[in-house]
Image: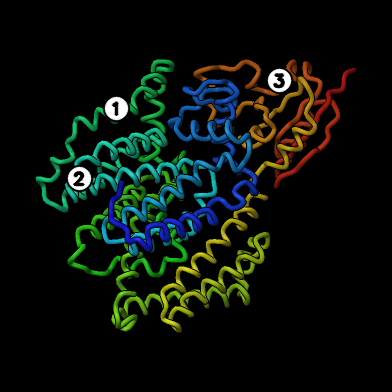
């Protein structure tokens, strides 16, 4: 939908290179790491239960309604499971496809604004941002939201700035899908960013955004599911709109409260290894494309400010800000490469490279010869060796070699090398955070009429890998609202004493609990306990009751 007339030599070259990079960075060994709790386990288990219950309209988690988010990602994941089986890579496939789609969107929008080379560089920069690679390889809502929101924003801006009215319905369709991924936050961000884009062209341009026909299209796509759920559960609108949107935004006490400056460092980390060059790109001035550049700056700035004002914060929220920043940097680098004077005309660029070089080599020195204050911190990276060392040395060599040979292609090659290190690092992290091995152990020991019981502990991933739901000794969880809507007898017990009859009716029980609770439980129940698996301080314990 983003138009430009590609040259014959690059008609397939640039898209082909982007596809190869995306396949390598986003899809290679996608299923190797186990699904991690809480997010990956939760969304995979919801999709599994969607197939189990044959209910595609009311998402369920642990057999109770789970209505914190709309269903589009669950539908996509369930369809992937239907096609490929209950595999980790199938669960992550929607996120990886969304990430690859985002790279194509960056190429198309950059090409429409400035040209093919700018689009290609912007897309490659986006594809090699460390935060983008990580989020492409984990099952969360944020990559799918970023894809549909980016598609909507890009199409809307081209319709607004290039007078291409026929793009507006497609922009609103994409926006509707973004709402079905994560809710009204997509409407707020799109309205804010489109409004800023319209203001760039004067107050009167705001009237262009008044499009009743497109609003009807948006409502037709979005509202049926919301109305259906509200009809089934009248408490849903208050819970969904107030508690999980307004309250989450204005009061982060229960929703990952962080300071106002939190997303600044997160954004810089997500942009790595391009972090040091981004401020230089933002500071450039070009009269020919001033409004397009300013729109992209406002886009990224609006995402950053909007989420910074929120009391509840999580790192993936900042994802929609990466694409406009990548495009700005790609356009700046292409313009720099086209100048005969090279780096001499851009002292700001050289200064950025020198700062990058200095900071990276200092980081290398601190890693290999750490002071006492850093030793304990670096010990936490032992499980990731040798990747931190290789990554830091590569991060230092990239700007150093670029300054020496004065070839910008070195930056791209270095970014690809650094990006290739992200997947194995995610593999190592998953060993600490995934209940995969514990779940497979439980499946191997399972027998008919057995039960999985959580003692003040619950794991969505353990449910997914074991294919079993939890019976829970009751405590506050994300299941509380669904439990009120559709009480499930036998799944929740207020006290251990209330569980006695249930335990007596099962030939074997598997307890999932932490070590202190295990010591307490052995004093409460008479029977044989056998520890089957451990993950950090969590235990999977087989139990058979003793009878007098």
Q: CA distance from mark 1 to mark 2?
A: 22 Å
Residue assigned mark 1: 219
Residue most extreme to the front: 8
| Residue drawn at the location 63% of the way across and 34% of the way down | 85
Q: Residues within 10 Å of mark 2 (few under 14, many from 20)?
A: few
Q: Secondary structure at mark 1?
A: helix
Task: Give the residue number, with chain letter if any, for mark 3.
Answer: 499
Secondary structure at numbered mark 3: helix
Q: Is residue 481 visible?
A: no
Against 261, residue 255 (above or below) is above
Q: Earlier in the sequence, mark 1 or mark 3?
A: 1
Q: Where's residue 178, x and y in %? A: 37, 38
Q: Is residue 282 above or below residue 88?
A: below
In the displayed structure image, the side of residue 448 where residue 378 appears, left or right: left
Q: Which residue is label 2 attached to? A: 164
- Residue at 32% over, 84% down: 344
């Amino acid at each position: 939908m983003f138009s430009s007339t590609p040259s014959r030599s690059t008609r397939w070259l640039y898209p082909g290179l982007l596809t190869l990079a995306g396949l390598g960075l986003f899809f290679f060994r996608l299923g190797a790491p186990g699904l991690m709790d809480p997010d990956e386990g939760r969304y995979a288990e919801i999709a599994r239960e969607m197939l189990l219950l044959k209910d595609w309209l009311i998402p369920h988690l642990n057999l109770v309604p789970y209505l914190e988010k709309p269903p589009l990602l669950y539908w996509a994941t369930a369809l992937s499971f239907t096609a490929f089986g209950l595999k980790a890579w199938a669960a992550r496939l929607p996120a990886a496809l969304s990430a690859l789609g985002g790279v194509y969107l960056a190429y198309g929008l950059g090409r429409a604004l400035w040209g093919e080379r700018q689009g290609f560089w912007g897309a490659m920069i986006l594809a090699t941002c460390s935060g983008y690679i990580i989020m492409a390889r984990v099952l969360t809502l944020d990559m799918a939201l970023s894809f549909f929101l980016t598609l909507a924003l890009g199409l809307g801006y081209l319709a607004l700035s290039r007078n291409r009215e026929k793009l507006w319905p497609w922009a609103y369709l994409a926006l509707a899908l973004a709402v079905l991924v994560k809710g009204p936050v997509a409407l707020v961000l799109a309205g804010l960013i489109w409004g800023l884009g319209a203001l760039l062209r004067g107050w009167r341009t705001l009237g262009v955004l008044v499009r009743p026909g497109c609003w009807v299209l948006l409502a037709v796509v979005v509202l049926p599911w919301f109305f259906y759920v509200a009809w089934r559960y009248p408490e849903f609108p208050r819970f969904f709109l107030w508690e999980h949107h307004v309250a989450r935004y204005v009061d982060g006490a229960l929703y990952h409260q962080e300071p106002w400056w939190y997303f600044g460092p997160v954004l810089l980390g997500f942009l790595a290894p391009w972090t040091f060059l981004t401020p230089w790109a933002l500071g450039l001035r070009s009269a020919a494309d001033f409004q397009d550049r300013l729109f992209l700056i406002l886009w990224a700035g609006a995402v950053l400010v909007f989420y910074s004002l929120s009391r509840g914060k999580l790192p993936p929220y900042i994802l929609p800000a990466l694409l406009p920043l990548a495009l700005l940097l790609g356009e700046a680098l292409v313009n720099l490469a086209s100048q005969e004077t090279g780096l001499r005309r851009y002292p700001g660029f050289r200064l950025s490279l020198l700062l990058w070089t200095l900071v990276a080599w200092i980081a290398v020195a601190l890693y290999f010869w750490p002071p006492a204050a850093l030793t304990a911190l670096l010990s936490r990276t032992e499980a990731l060796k040798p990747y931190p060392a290789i990554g830091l040395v590569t991060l230092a060599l990239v700007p150093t070699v670029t300054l020496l040979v004065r070839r910008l292609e070195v930056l791209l090659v270095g970014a690809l090398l650094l990006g290739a290190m992200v997947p194995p690092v995610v593999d190592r992290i998953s060993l600490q955070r995934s209940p995969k091995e514990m779940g497979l152990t439980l499946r191997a020991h399972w027998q008919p009429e057995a039960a999985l019981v959580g003692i003040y502990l619950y794991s969505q991933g353990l449910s997914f890998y074991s294919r079993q739901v939890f019976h829970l000794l009751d405590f506050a969880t994300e299941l509380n609202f669904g439990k009120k809507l559709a009480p499930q007898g036998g799944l929740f017990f207020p006290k251990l004493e209330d569980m006695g009859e249930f335990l007596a009716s099962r030939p074997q029980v598997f307890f999932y609990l932490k070590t202190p609770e295990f010591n307490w439980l052995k004093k409460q129940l008479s029977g044989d306990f056998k520890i089957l698996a451990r993950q950090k301080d969590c235990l999977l314990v087989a139990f058979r009751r003793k009878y007098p």
